[in-house]
Image: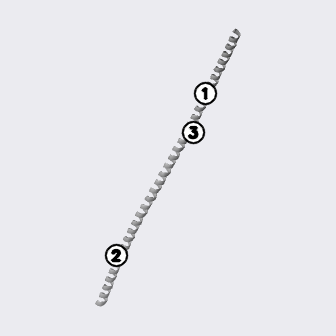
């Protein structure tokens, strides 16, 4: 009977050791999975941060491009306005020069008439 009890004790002890080993192995496996999950989460976070940074960079580039486009359009409108102003000013100057030239022609015509009349009067007196 003692050998039966010893056999049961040995079997129970072997079962206990096997259970402890299995529990230890399971604990290690869980810790490994937790560690792997933690690393995967870190990698996912890093990737998400990278994508976010890239997205922010693209937004900034797009914002800068829109700003440059606005500035270019503003400069273009300003140049068109300056050109129109210069054209109007040139037109005014040309018209003024034409008026001045007509006035000068009129004065010369008047002088010519007066001179012609004066010459006629002089020839009549002679």
Mark 1 falls on what kind of element? helix
Q: Where does the image place residue 35, in percent across and percent down from the top left? A: 38, 68
> Which residue position is annotated with label 1?
97
Task: Give the distance between the C-alpha atoms of the residues marked 2 and 3, in whole angstroms.
Answer: 83 Å
120 relative to 69 in the view: left or right: right
> Which residue position is annotated with label 2?
24
Mark 3 falls on what kind of element? helix
**Most distant residue in the left direction:** 2
Tell me what residue is drawn at x 47 percent, y 55 percent: 55
Residue 116, quarter of the rendered image? top right
Tell me what residue is drawn at x 36 percent, y 73 percent: 28
Mark 2 falls on what kind of element? helix
Q: Label 2 crowding class (10 Å Cα cut-off): few <14, some 14-19, many 20+?
A: few
Q: Label 3 crowding class (10 Å Cα cut-off): few <14, some 14-19, many 20+?
A: few
Q: Where does the image place residue 88, in percent across and percent down from the top left? A: 59, 33
> Which residue position is annotated with label 3?
80
Tell me which numbered mark, 2 or 3, is placed earlier along the sequence: 2
Q: Is residue 11 above or below residue 119?
A: below
90 relative to 32 in the view: left or right: right
Q: In the image, which is nearer the foreground, mark 1 or mark 3?
A: 1
Decide which of 83, 43 is in the foreground and name it.
83
Residue 89, quarter of the rendered image? top right
Decide which of 75, 120 is in the foreground and name it.
120
């Amino acid at each position: 009977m003692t050998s039966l009890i010893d056999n049961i004790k040995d079997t129970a002890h072997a079962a206990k050791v096997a259970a402890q080993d299995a529990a230890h192995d399971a604990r290690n496996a869980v810790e490994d999975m937790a560690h792997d999950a933690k690393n995967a989460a870190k990698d996912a976070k890093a990737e998400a941060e990278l994508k976010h940074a890239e997205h922010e960079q693209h937004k900034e580039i797009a914002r800068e491009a829109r700003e440059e486009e606005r500035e270019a359009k503003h400069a273009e409108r300003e140049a068109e306005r300056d050109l129109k102003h210069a054209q109007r000013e040139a037109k005014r100057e040309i018209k003024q020069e034409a008026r001045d030239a007509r006035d000068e022609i009129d004065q010369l015509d008047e002088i010519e008439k007066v001179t012609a009349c004066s010459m006629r009067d002089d020839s009549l007196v002679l």
